[in-house]
Image (cartoon, rainbow, N blue to C red):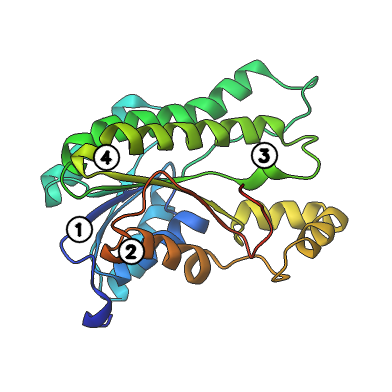
């Protein structure tokens, strides 16, 4: 790793769902800029794979088993980072356990689980990390452009979960700005395992989806999504807060 890009040297990041996909890409990119990474996720072996690759590249990371639906796990994850490096300066809420269904066929319990793993867990972690974020902290929450889809059939429950995250992020930016804590949302299209699986299972819809992206491709988890998030956590973005930013090749109109 080049010293020229280590603008996050001395920072500590907690990333949920970092064992694969977008979370892993963000972990790699933040580590490249010098941040120490708490790689958390439900499957410890996946987190260890991410951790080992960061270390192989010359960075610092630890793997933390954490089911974000479990409040004790969330507290333990933060406490682990406090004990290891002094607490997180950067929080990335990426983990999800989403529920895809039509409205009439939706299952209340599955939707509540999705909300618990998404906006509820994000709020809990934001509150747990608040004392450590004060001064120069940065929150990045992962949402989706699903609510901007031309046809929301089947996607409205997922969109509702993600829109709640956008509202919470705006609230954190408003309430905690005086503490010099920034909070932003990114809404990515990325070659995550989930999206790859969806595209493979729905080839015609996937082709139509890609055709609506002006850049005609889905983003790479590290190069397109991770590096943008790393820039958003860096000093050059120190006056950016409360924003929802689509990283989607120009597809969504966020106005």
Can residue 74 be seen here? The reply is: no
Q: In this view, does 101 lie to the left or right of 192?
A: right
Relative image position of residue 253 (x, y in whole percent):
66, 52
Numbered tag placed on residue 147 in the rendering: 3
Viewer-proximal residue among 31 and 235: 235
At numbered mark 3, what does the secondary structure look like: helix, strand or loop? helix
Can residue 115 be seen here? The reply is: yes
Residue pictured at 61% horizontal, 18% vertical: 109
Disc 2: CA contacts within 10 A as few (<14), some (14-19) or many (>=20):
many
Residue at numbered disc 2 = 30
**Is disc 2 in contact with disc 3, using a CB cutoff of under 8 Å?**
no
Q: In terms of image quadrants, where is residue 163?
A: top right
Viewer-proximal residue among 244 and 49: 244
Q: Which residue lies furthest to the front in this view?
A: 255
**Is disc 2 in contact with disc 1, using a CB cutoff of under 8 Å?**
yes
Residue at numbered disc 4 = 177
At numbered mark 4, what does the secondary structure look like: helix, strand or loop? helix
Q: Please, is residue 105 above or below residue 14 in the view?
A: above
């Amino acid at each position: 790793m080049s010293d020229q890009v280590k603008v996050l040297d001395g920072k500590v990041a907690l990333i949920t769902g970092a064992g694969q996909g977008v979370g892993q890409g963000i972990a790699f990119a933040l580590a490249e800029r010098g941040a120490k990474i708490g790689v958390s996720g439900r499957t410890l072996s996946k987190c260890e794979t991410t951790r080992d690759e960061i270390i192989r590249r010359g960075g610092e990371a630890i793997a933390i088993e954490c089911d974000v639906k479990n409040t004790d796990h969330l507290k333990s994850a933060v406490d682990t980072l406090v004990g290891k490096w002094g607490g997180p300066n950067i929080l990335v809420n990426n983990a999800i356990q989403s529920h895809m269904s039509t409205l009439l066929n939706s299952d209340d319990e599955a939707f509540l689980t999705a909300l618990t793993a998404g906006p509820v867990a994000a709020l809990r972690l934001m509150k747990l990390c608040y004392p450590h974020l004060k001064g120069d902290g940065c929150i990045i929450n992962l949402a989706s452009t699903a609510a901007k889809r031309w046809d929301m059939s089947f996607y409205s429950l997922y969109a509702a979960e993600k829109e709640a995250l956008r509202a919470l992020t705006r609230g954190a930016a408003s309430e905690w700005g005086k503490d010099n804590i920034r909070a932003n949302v990114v809404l990515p299209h990325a070659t995550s395992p989930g999206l790859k699986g969806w595209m493979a299972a729905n080839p015609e819809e996937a082709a139509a989806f890609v055709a609506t992206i002006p850049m005609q491709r889905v983003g790479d988890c590290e190069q397109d999504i991770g590096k943008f998030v790393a820039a958003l956590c860096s000093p050059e973005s120190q006056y950016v807060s409360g924003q929802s930013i689509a990283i989607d090749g120009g597809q969504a109109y966020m106005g």
